[in-house]
Image: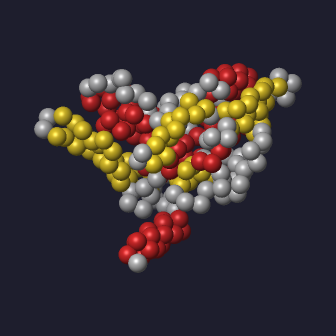
Amino acid sequence: MADNNLIYKDNRIIEASYRLSIREQRLVLLALSQINALEKLNENKVITITASEYSSVFGVDQKNAFRDMKWAMDQLFNQFIKVIVNEDKTETFRWLSKKSATLSNQSVEVRFTADIAPYLHNLKGKFTKYQFLNISGMASVFSIRIYEMLMQWKIKRTLTITVDDLKDRLEIADKYKAFANLKQKVIDTAIEEINACSDIVVSYEPIKRGRKVVSVRFDYEFKKGMEPTQEIKQGIQDVIKDIKRRLR
């Protein structure tokens, strides 16, 4: 894996609407770990992922790793992601433009589409990064997605999001009509896994309008000895620079 096992994503991907299975999500993350997100990506770059790597990272029996990767690749090839480009525009496009599997060396090859590539490489503006290790032990796609959303707010260490926006990002707008069901099936499961597997401890509070829960506030702290001090310091400096630029 490239760059000390770091995952980089443009914030618009963090905020995008999509729903992948855990195996599809794992395949995407392994592919991203091989990209130097701070440099320009060759549009023809094909990424190779081996069953031994998949098995080692996710603790899957190697006999099943190739099967899982191939299934995930085939499913991902037909998956779409919806990105909010700006307040006036959204874009929907596929994840992959190419896929192949090689039985002899138990590997798959994938290539990201030209549409999504700009959100994954040559990142110079607002992007989120985190260590691969902090999500590799998670078994729920909701845990990974919510963890990524929280990592977008490392300086404030808090995220308030409407229930509708959360469900839209996770593409479950047609499910869990009652907040109690969303809490049990999605939020509580995610928080339990994040607290057990990652570098942070999260709590949350439902926010009501009248009797209806309309938003959720997540607060978190880094576990002892796991706070990315230098990154937080740089983030604060960037915020100060941005404020000064807007006041000119």
Q: Nearer the viewer, residue 54 or 216?
A: 216
**Residue 71 location, x and y as percent?**
67, 21
Furthest residue in direction left, as rendered: 210
**Residue 91 location, x and y as percent?**
52, 38
**Residue 14 location, x and y as percent?**
49, 45
Furthest residue in direction bottom, as rendered: 248
Q: Nearer the viewer, residue 237 or 147?
A: 237
Q: Nearer the viewer, residue 113 or 150?
A: 113
**Residue 67 location, x and y as percent?**
71, 21
Residue at 31% in and 37% down? 163
Which color mode does the image show?
Answer: secondary structure
Find residue 117 and report its image quarter: top right
| Visible residue check, residue 141 | no
Horizontal side of residue 111 vs 126, given as left or right: right
Find residue 165 and report its image quarter: top left
Residue at 24% in and 38% down? 214
Q: Nearer the viewer, residue 112 or 6?
A: 112
Q: Is residue 84 above or below residue 231?
A: above
Q: Can you say which quadrant of the picture contains the C terminus? A: bottom left
| Visible residue check, residue 212 | yes
Q: Is residue 69 above or below residue 44?
A: above
Q: Is residue 173 above or below residue 87?
A: above
Residue at 50% in and 30% down? 19
